[in-house]
Image (tube, helix red, strand yellow):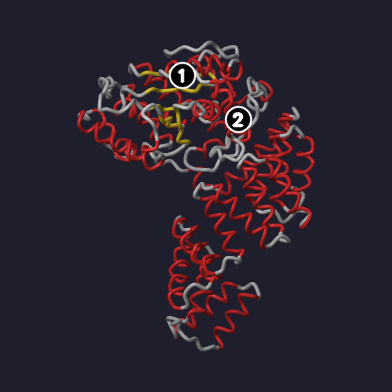
Amino acid sequence: MPKPEMPTAAMTRAIALFRAGKPGAAGAACREVLAEDTDHPTALELLGLIEGMQGDVDEARTLLERANELRPDRPELLNNLAIACRKSSDPAAAIRYLRRALKRHPTFAPAWHTLALTQQQMGDYQGALESQERVTSLEPEQAEAWSNLAQIREALNQPVAAAEAAERALALEADNVLSNMVLARVEIRQGAADAACARLQRTLTRDDLLRNHEIILRQLLGTAFDRLGQTDEAFAAFTEANRLQARDYHAAYTITEGPYALPAIRRIGDYLREGRLDTAPADVDDGYPPPIFLLGFPRSGTTLLDRMLSAHPQLISIEEQETLVDLQRDFVLPPDGLDRLAGLEPTEAALYRQAYRRRLADLVDLSTLGPERRIIDKLPLNTIFLPLIGRIFPDARILLALRDPRDVCLSCFMQSFSLNAAMAHFLDPELTVEYYREVMALGLDTLERWPLRVHQIRYEDLVVDPPATIGAALDFLGLPWDDTVLDYRSDLAGSRIATPSYTQVSEPIYRRAVGRWRRYAEPLSAVLESLTPMVERLGYESGEGIANDDSL
């Protein structure tokens, strides 16, 4: 039975302080109660809620779990506990608590809302859509419910339905920020960049914007200005958005450790160029088809290429998943890791291949794939780990996406990425160029030194002649032509693309981004010259695409 609870003056004071917007004082009053009764359910629950609000999600979860043991299955408590689990990177536990709450209280809208957010966190956007629709059916007069639904529909490439949901939110709350963001995205996608500009500039005049909302709004404003050909205004908007993001994410921006950091990239490159890694071993035959890696650099057309290829009935893609963590852990992070890689025995390499296949199996149900199906492992920055791929998977088929370095670096600077140790380099033009040079030089040097099977695919060729470019890639993979690769957009509505390129990929193939750097030559003048060696190495002296060539 639930534990009986005696009212106390301290608990009454704690609740009053919390309702008055004084969580710190309310928390202190809760601790007074718990000093007298360590199992006071209300004190545990309120203190857990306060700890979660103040950022200590692990402590919040501990307190709320104990409160739930004492007074189990109250929907408000289960919802708060799920929020703490979600924020502590345990979405599976959050789902369990929410399902329990909704089984007993199926009309409790806050739990459906938290469930939608958690499903988004887990990549289940279809599930999130269904959960958020329950919220709008239960609380049709709540603007937040409609704005959240609008965001999910826009992420699922349903722009018309997204706009309808956003308009419902604005009818209830005229200045709803999230709905204006969605409508601006839709307007940009539909060619109404002038309307998007006006909407975004109007929204940016608010003095109560959250910092992350301002960053997104300025990124969108830059995109709208770019579509309108207003280069100076676009560059200024992107610069300000990146400045705000760099300030808010200072730790990620300055990080220098880890497999994607510049010191690690330079260490691998030096080791390779000094000849301390032997030539890649001979092909292996362990009964499995050679893996396919789609590499390059972010914003080189990898998402478009991936979507077209994965429309082929014999190809399936795992999009931007970390499948090489075992190699990074053992060969990049330890000081002697590269020495160990150089001396790796064939039997040891086979174990790493098995570990890689197990990771694929966690992402794709391999039992459902026919014998002819192949998996595309698409993560552009795995270019950094080409020496590792070459040693462990000498039979791999490597698709290398290339694009004019000037367009790549500009596009990275203009794009809104979720920051991590790699993406944080793109907040500054000079750092973007430095990172590009180091990553691509390492990849190209590896392919020049080792006899790996590689096929270059230039973005400029892809957008000018998709059939010929994709056909050559399929020939390289030993696959027949299939017309579905040109009809890839038919499957995009209602599907989630887990990269920032999802809005561009949902459009018909366009050429407007080829040579875009020329419009930004003046604001980029300080960094363009340092890209010249890589521009020439890739054959882009004129800034135009060249014919495909399987060799580097």
Q: Residues within 10 Å of mark 2 (few under 14, many from 20)?
A: some
Establish if 85 lies above or below 21.
Answer: above
Q: Observer-nearest residue: 17 or 39?
A: 39
Q: Secondary structure at mark 2?
A: helix
Q: Observer-nearest residue: 224 or 66?
A: 66
Q: Is residue 508 left or right of residue 187?
A: left
Residue marked by disc 2: 489
Q: Residues within 10 Å of mark 1 (few under 14, many from 20)?
A: some
Q: Is residue 510 left or right of residue 173?
A: left
Percent across and percent down for residue 456 are 47, 18
Mark nearer the N terminus (1 vs 2): 1
- Quarter of the image with the C terminus is top left
- Quarter of the image with the N terminus is bottom left
Establish if 348 lies above or below 516.
Answer: below
Residue marked by disc 1: 474
Q: Observer-nearest residue: 266 or 77?
A: 77
The amino acid sitting under disc 2 is Arg
Q: Residue drawn 46% across and 19% down?
A: 474
Percent across and percent down for residue 96 are 46, 61
Q: Secondary structure at mark 1?
A: helix
Marks 1 and 2 in Cβ contact (< 8 Å): no
The answer to whether residue 56 is visible is no
Give the spatial CA distance, label 1 vs label 2: 19 Å
Q: Quadrant of residue 344?
A: top left
Percent across and percent down for residue 28 are 52, 77
Percent across and percent down for residue 540 are 55, 14
Establish if 109 lies above or below 455.
Answer: below
Q: Is residue 263 left or right of residue 164?
A: left
The amino acid sitting under disc 1 is Leu
